[in-house]
Amino acid sequence: MDMERALEVDQVPPPIETKSGSFVYYTKGSASGSQLYCRRAANGTEPEQVLIDTDDLSAQYGYELKSLLISDDHGCIGCLVTHIDGSHSGTETSNLMLFSLKDNGKVEHLQTLDNIFNFVFGENDTLFYTVLNDKLRAHKIRYHCIGHPQCNDIDIFVEEDDECFVDITRTKDKKFHIINSSTLDSSEVYVFSSSAIGTDTSDSVNAQLLRRRQRGVEYYADHYEGEFVILTNSPVNDDSDVSIGEPLPFRLMRAPSALPSSKNWKPLLCVADDERIEDVEMFRDYIMVSVKRQGRPVVIIHNRVSKSNSELPLPNGGNCVVRPDSNPQFDTSTVRLCFSSPVHLESTIEYNMATQTPHKSWTSTPLHIDPDDYVIQHERAPSDGLQVPVTLIRHKSISLASQ
């Protein structure tokens, strides 16, 4: 059988949509093969608006699009772009094109900022961006008022340690900005209120440190309704700067917004000794926690209202690889997961977190086999005094006893 037929995709999920205010934003492909960044009215009464066509961006400005963000007030589009002619090659930096966005979907070029690595919008026509040092590490965060000259921008954070890499993000509820200064084995996170800075470039950012850097300790933060949620492998009852030799398991903690430092962290969700937390994603009423249990994936849904925990039923009884898909919507009870297994190519399932049930799926199988005809088992085989995990795949018509 030829490779094209063997790898044919049976089903493709629709584009991920994000509702923000009175609009729904999404991307789709055009007949020419370009990417279209679109929106429509959430009430469905207005026609679709195409905001950015990557072909037009290339033809008119000579740029290739890397990423795109919409401001909170829906009045500005930020496009991180690189030159098609390759003049950005080897620099790892980009330009940031800013466009005004009208209610009718029309866009107009406002200005272009140079030598940007990453960016995120603030409130009140502001944004923050990172720049690289001569070692190609993001080391500085700058503050920009949209429409003002870039030469007026001010530094709000500068990392002097060349080993660190700096980034700025936004909590999913858009209440706080997060500055993360990280190395391969450590984190140092600062937070500041997104509403605490205006359009005056003399405004200062009062960033709070969550936990000082400690070798071997990493942590990540998000926020919702008056508290931060922190995923960390920090030692219990230890806030020192002494290096940690062997990395510790991650824990899920919480802290009040007004007192976010590590001395105020409290456990939010505990897992068993044979479980390891790998990832966390926040939603308005739920927290999705990706866990490994004896090497197999488990997805726990923590209901923030009822304070209860439930597990999502995974394909093949959990005999698969699972990772979260892009889930940008905060106010939703639906979550997308990607999975693959020995009898599935990369596939997608949407779950209802309220009922812990799948309600949509888009699956693809190699060689057009029927996954229901096969059994996947995880066993342990003794070897030199150790129990080595083994994955067995067999057709249902074949019994292990006959092998």
Image: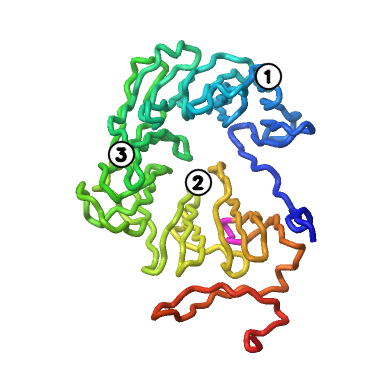
Which residue is more in the foreground, 26 or 330? 26
Q: Nearer the viewer, mark 1 or mark 3?
A: 1
Magenta range is 353-357
Who's the residue at 50% across and 67% down the image? 296
**Residue that lies at the very extreme toward the bottom in this rendered image:** 401
N-terminal label among 2 and 1: 1
Q: Amino acid at mark 3?
A: Ala
Q: Position of residue 101 (x, y in %)?
A: 62, 20
- Disc 1 is placed on an element classified as loop
Quick check: can you spot residue 372? Answer: yes
N-terminal label among 1 and 3: 1
Q: Amino acid at mark 1?
A: Lys
| Mark 2 lies on residue | 284
Which residue is more in the foreground, 153 or 368? 368
Quick check: can you spot residue 120? Answer: no
Q: Position of residue 104 (x, y in %)?
A: 69, 21
Q: Quadrant of the N terminus?
A: bottom right
- Disc 2 is placed on an element classified as loop
Q: Position of residue 36 (x, y in %)?
A: 70, 31
Q: Is there CB contact under 8 Å for labels 2 and 3?
A: no
Q: Nearer the viewer, mark 2 or mark 1?
A: 1
